[in-house]
Amino acid sequence: MDELSPQQRHNNMAAIHGKDTKPEMVVRRWLWGRGFRYRLNHPRLPGKPDIVMRKYRTCIFVNGCFWHGHEGCRYYTIPKTNTEFWVNKVKRNKERDLKVQHELAAMGWHSITIWECELKPVKREDTLESLAYTLNKIFLQDRTVKQYEILEEEPMMAAEDIADYNKKNINDV
Ligand SMILES: [Zn+2]
């Protein structure tokens, strides 16, 4: 019965400990190869994101289709037995995912979810290319927003200065 190859055993152990599971590794290796740098399981961020990219203020979650309830996905099928248990379990996971994303957004972080099915060999390259595209878009957008904010702040300060100046002049009279 217990005829696992060392590699299978390793994969099983990795899956049990929630670390270095294969789909996550696929994303990491690809990002690294493309020159993107990241941190793993950032301790201070909600939801312990799988991959944290500071430069892009982005957290990447690599989600298993079953555990995180990927709607409309053929890998998300509720077992015929203990149905209620599984439905509730997946529902709770989804609620937690959403809460984490809101918390991250409130802290100014972007969240990107990659589903395991999107990393199957046929879709992998497209998924990762679009990830790179999204990251670059986020980077440019954030910089544009910051520049815009600076431009907006300056006239405001000038207006306050003028108001102060006027007040002072009135008091002086
Ligand atoms: Zn899926």
Image: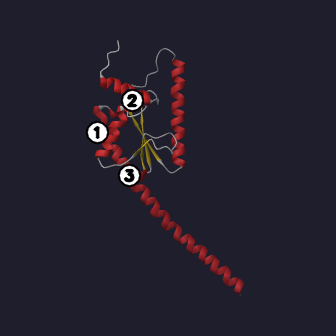
Tag 2's secondary structure?
helix
Do callouts 1 and 3 mark residues in contact (Cβ within 8 Å)?
no
Q: Quick check: 35 left or right of 162?
A: left
Calculate the distance from the C-alpha at mark 2 to the C-alpha at mark 3: 33 Å
Tag 3's secondary structure?
helix
- In this rendering, the count of numbered labels is 3
Q: Please report the residue visible at 28 percent of the width from the left and 32 percent of the height from the top.
A: 121
Residue corresponding to mark 1 = 125
| Label whose residue precedes the other's in the sequence (2 or 3) | 2
Three-letter amino acid code at the position of disc 1: Glu
Residue corresponding to mark 2 = 14
Would you say the beta carbon of the disc 3 residue lies within 8 angstroms of ligand 1?
A: no
Three-letter amino acid code at the position of disc 3: Lys
Q: Can see residue 73?
A: no
User: Residue 64 is drawn in which quadrant?
Assistant: top left
**Up-down relation of residue 125 to residue 89 (above or below):** below
Residue corresponding to mark 3 = 137
